Image (cartoon, rainbow, N blue to C red):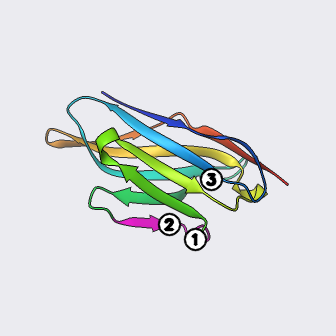
Amino acid sequence: QVQVVESGGGLVQAGGSLRLSCAASGSGFSITAVGWYRQAPGKQRELVAHTTSGGSTNYAGSLKGRFTISRDNAKNTVYLQMNSLKPEDTAVYYCNALVQIGDYGYSYWGQGTQVTVSS
């Protein structure tokens, strides 16, 4: 079993920054890819950024340049650095980890972390 836990959310003023962390724990797994998603009230969950074990990254077009995804493989942790935050970035941010255990792939979601940007 793998657990995925997000942290680092909070309340910040517009123009500020936050760094979110997504930590995967367990045994016998390797991370294939990790994605950060967000869901604002009344809206669908959307992809924010994504990174693979090969090191490739991609971002939602509107966020590239303000958000940066990075990873610490030794800690099984992926970060989302968010700069120049805007009120419209307010949402619950979720982490999704695609992992391999033996010959099988699995998808795990964290519980989410609230990000609130005040104007």
Q: Quadrant of residue 93?
A: top right
Mark 3 or 2, closer to the camera = 2
Give the residue number, with chain letter if any, for mark 1: 65
Residue at the spot x=56%, y=70% of the render? 64
Q: Which residues are magenta?
A: 56-63
**Residue 44 circle label:** 3
Mark 2 or 1, closer to the camera = 1
Mark 1 or 3, closer to the camera = 1
Q: In this orientation, which residue lies closer to the viewer: 65 or 110?
A: 65
Give the residue type at disc 2. Tyr
Alpha carbon separation for disc pair 1 and 3: 23 Å
Crowd around label 3: few <14 · some 14–19 · many ≥20 (10 Å): few
User: Could you tell me residue 12's position as x and y percent?
Assistant: 75, 47
Crowd around label 2: few <14 · some 14–19 · many ≥20 (10 Å): some
Residue 62 forms part of the magenta stretch: yes
**Residue 59 circle label:** 2
Instruction: Give whichever of discs 1 and 3 has the lower sequence position.
Output: 3
Q: In this orientation, which residue lies closer to the viewer: 44 or 38?
A: 38
Alpha carbon separation for disc pair 3 and 2: 17 Å
Residue at the spot x=37%, y=36% of the render? 24
